[in-house]
Image (cartoon, rainbow, N blue to C red):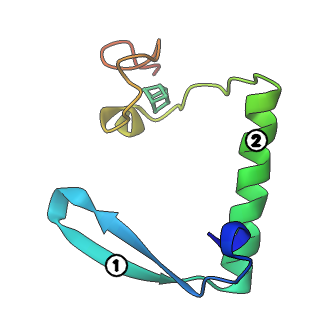
Amino acid sequence: MEESFKREVPIGFVDYVQVGERKPVIISQKLREEFYNTFNELESMILERYVPEATPSSRKCNKCEFKKFCEYGESSVPS
Ligand code: SF4
């Protein structure tokens, strides 16, 4: 939105769909920088076709929306 409208966006909202709640998030300069750093890292990973290692925590796989496609998802979670 900031790039499209060429204006800083001071607040965003996160929807917690499963519990039907929406929470505001103040977008500080620090949070904005963290977002762009993470975004740039992800963009590099996608462009370089880098696939990260599977998570060592099977708890994360339980709610992962990619578990049906991931070789470690569902029943074959790494220990
Ligand atoms: S299912 Fe695959 S992609 Fe999802 S959290 Fe587990 S290892 Fe990561």
Q: Quadrant of the N terminus?
A: bottom right
- Rendering coords of residue 48 (x, y %): 83, 26
Amino acid type indicated by mark 2: Glu
What percent of the width, then of the height, locates residue 27? 60, 82
What's the CA distance linking mark 1 and mark 2? Answer: 27 Å
Q: Which mark is residue 43?
A: 2
Q: Which residue is at a point 64% across and 25% down the rendered structure image?
A: 53
| Label placed on residue 59 | none
Q: How many marks?
A: 2
Q: Quadrant of residue 5?
A: bottom right
Label 1 sits on what residue type?
Lys
Which quarter of the rendered picture does the C terminus lie within? top left
Q: Label 1 belongs to which residue? A: 23
SS for dot 1: strand
Q: Position of residue 18 (x, y in %)?
A: 19, 56
Furthest residue toward left: 19
Closer-to-camera residue (74/41): 41
Q: Please provide percent x and percent y for residue 31.
A: 66, 76
